[in-house]
Image: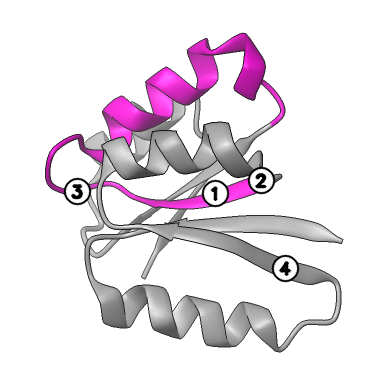
Amino acid sequence: MIRVALADDQILVRAGFRALLAAQPDIEVVGEAADGEQALALMRERHPDVVLMDIRMPVLDGLAATRRITEDPALGEVKVVMLTTFELDEYVFEAIRSGASGFLVK
């Protein structure tokens, strides 16, 4: 079972991803966050295998949250896949430099 967390400030985006992922028999959505700080708390509480992380969120953006996740030894197993509506090369490069394992345009 792959445990997935969703971090996006748009509730409809989270609901869409949740519906798509819930239809898969080997994926469990373990929680949702609306900003980077909530995402960090969720990672520490639920220890998902993967987090789908929006790159631009309030309070703490996805890039900063990703850096904190990848720098935290207790969260070393969490893989971050960055999500954005912007197809900008600098976002891709910064996401990878921040420790993201992948990057998707939503």
Disc number at residue 48?
2
Decide if residue 85 is on the left or right side of residue 29.
left
| Label 3 neighbour load within 10 Å: few <14, some 14-19, many 20+ | many
Looking at the image, residue 6 sits to the left or right of residue 57; the answer is right
Query: CA separation, marks 4 and 3?
Result: 24 Å
Q: Amino acid at mark 1?
A: Val
Query: Which residue is located at x 57 percent, y 38 percent?
Result: 45
Q: Amino acid type of disc 4? A: Glu
Q: Residue at x 50, y 11 (%)?
A: 71
- Work out whether residue 91 or residue 99 is closer to the camera in this orientation and state it: 99
Three-letter code, disc 2 = Pro
Q: What residue is at 28 percent from the left and 75 percent from the top? A: 11
Labels 2 and 4: the sequence-earlier one: 4
Marks 2 and 3, how far apart at CA: 21 Å
- Real-space Cα separation, disc 4 to disc 1, in angstroms: 12 Å
Residue range corresponding to the magenta coloring: 50-77
- Judging by the rendered image, the residue that carries numbered circle 1 is 51
Q: Check if mark 2's residue and mark 1's residue have beta carbons within 8 Å.
A: yes
Residue farthest left in this picture: 58
The residue under label 4 is 28
